Amino acid sequence: MSKTAKIAAGGVAVGLILLIWLPWWVSFLIVVGVPVAAYLALDPSQRRRLRRVTRKELGR
């Protein structure tokens, strides 16, 4: 199993545990908030590069 697959499996496991322990809306805020916070932590040049790569891959 690749490193990325292990991280994804761990994220799913943590998400399921959070759904059991916390109300659904708190779990939703965590699931949405972490990627948004990571995106906002990027420099403007890194954000531009990320958007450019995403658009290129969508145009395939």
Image: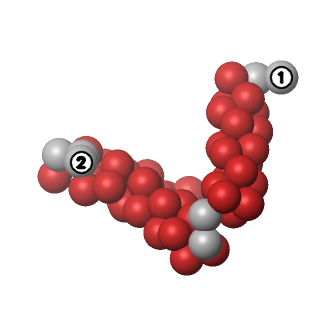
**Looking at the image, which is closer to me, 14 or 23?**
23
Q: Residue furthest right?
A: 1
Asked if one can make out residue 5 in the rendered structure from this viewpoint, the answer is yes
Image coords of residue 20 (percent x, y):
73, 60
Closer to the camera in the image, 20 or 43: 20
Q: Which mark is residue 41?
A: 2
Kindly give the residue lying farthest to the front in the view shown: 21
Q: Please, what secondary structure does the residue beneath circle 2 have? A: loop
Which residue type carries mark 2? Ala
Residue depicted at x 55% and y 76%: 25
Residue at (63, 74) in percent of width and height: 24
- For marks 2 and 1, the one nearer the N-term is 1
Q: Is residue 20 above or below residue 23?
A: above
Measured in 3D between alpha carbons, the distance from the residue under mark 2 to the one under mark 1, in whole angstroms, is: 29 Å
Q: Is residue 28 visible?
A: no
Give the residue drawn at x 61%, y 72%: 23
Q: How is the image coloured?
A: secondary structure
> Relative to 18, is 8 above or below?
above
From the image, which quarter does the C terminus lie in?
bottom right
Residue depicted at 66% across the width and 33% down the height: 7
Which residue position is annotated with label 1? 1
Q: Residues within 10 Å of mark 1 (few under 14, many from 20)?
A: few
Question: Looking at the rendered structure, which numbered label has been put on residue 58?
Answer: none
Q: Residue 39, how many percent across, how many down?
A: 33, 54
